Image (cartoon, grey):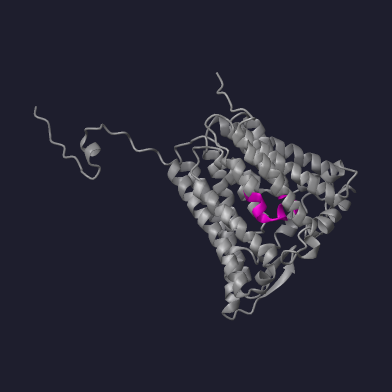
Amino acid sequence: MKPRTQSWTNPRLLPLAVTWPATRALMLWLLSRDDRALLGVGGVGREVHELYARWYGVLVQGTFPSGDRLWQYPPGAGPVLLSPALLPGLTYFQAFVVLTLAADALITLALTRAGTRTGRSLRGAALWTAGLPLLLHIPLARYDVQVTALAVISLLTLSRSTRACGAFAALGALVKVWPALTLIGTPRGRTTRETWTSAAVTAGALLLALAALFRDPFDFLRQQSGRGVQIESLGGTVLSFARHAGWPGRVRYRYGAMEFTGPYVTGIAAVSLALTVAAFGALLLWRLRARRWTPATPYDAALSAVLLFTVTSRVISPQYLVWLLGLAAVCLTSRHTTQRPVAALITAAAAASALAYPVLYADVIACTWTGSLLMLVRNGLLVAAATLSFRRLWTAGLPAAPDLPENSALGRNPHTIPVIFPTRQ
């Protein structure tokens, strides 16, 4: 017999029903005044107005933006950027924002439905509802909410359909790679085989379809390899403080982001890549050695993996916090999660990110003490979250100590080593 779920009329849902439209209205208001530089540098919506709209014009002609140094996304991003055509009565910008809000609402509903099940928690829906506005209006002007929706649905469907879980993860990975990491924590055996097989089949089928419909679907690989060290990355924070110590490097706009150029930048980028490889190795080692799986383990592992890859990346854009908030919210739907303090650190990092961009972005670019210290705080929170997340994931996966009889020597005093005497014959 299936456990009964709580009713959607539960009064605990009222705060969510009130908070979501109120906060999203505020985000829309900020976006409507983006061009007035109300907060810092402004221009947050320019990426949709100019860049996404330009790519849309290329994509409708049946080709990916070949040779465009700013096009650094897998081919699955094409359909997402074409999706505003589904709302022909609106401008491209208006349709994009409406669809982003729809994806946001879908995430909220999925988290709420998961949280109302017996033995689950609404903390995840609350975190997403109240945490996303900490990034101000940035989430509405990027397509990271849509990608996060695919990752969230992938994780939440695992307990019901392994094939659906794999398919949604594959769809997300073809849009922005990182959702592939949501499968790192699937339980061993049949669940992993079915989930990963579904992901591979879905990815293969979609890639074939996109290759048949569009020209140059893999040109993004050439552009991605040329990226440097973004000023908001962990390596960028090191170089920002190095400027105060006399380092002669400069900040330049390259590959769609503000990056450092000058001596040692190549070395910093190489270190970041090496740390990413090490993080991947640590995750594989955890998977090989873990012996305990709880209902929350796939959620916790996904969050830990994306955190590790985020902090070791050469680029940590503010919209990356959308991913982390979504995955943290999924973790909090389960009472078995080990990631509650990690979610708190991510929430604090989201607030710091909004200060870094757009509010004080001019200071970050100029590497003033204010900008450098702000990035140190934001990235310090992310490093602390990643370290704590992986440590808790690792510890939770270790086999439990065997139960001991209550009256045994070890049961009475765990610091006492029992003396074993030979038996008489």
Q: Residue 292: percent from the left, percent from the top?
A: 45, 37
Queried whether the magenta region covers residue 143, the answer comes back as yes
Instruction: Tell me where residue 146 sits by quadrant.
Output: top right
Q: Which residues are magenta?
A: 131-144
Which of 240/216 is in front?
240
Quadrant of the image for the N terminus? top right
Q: Is residue 390 visible?
A: yes
Left or right, 414 with respect to 173, comes to: left
Instruction: Tell me where residue 423 sits by quadrant.
Output: top left
Which of 303/125 is in front?
125
Q: Residue 403: percent from the left, percent from the top?
A: 31, 33
Q: Residue 72: percent from the left, percent from the top?
A: 74, 56
Secondary structure mostly seen in the magenta stretch: helix
Left or right, 295 with respect to 16, comes to: left
Q: Residue 308: percent from the left, percent from the top?
A: 56, 53
Quadrant of the image for the C terminus? top left
Q: How many marks?
A: 0
Residue drawn at x 73%, y 42% is: 103
Queried whether the magenta region covers residue 68, the answer comes back as no
Q: Is residue 157 visible?
A: no
Left or right, 98 with respect to 179, comes to: right
Residue drawn at x 86%, y 56% is: 54
**Image: 359 above or below 81:** below
Instruction: Tell me where residue 37 sits by quadrant.
Output: bottom right
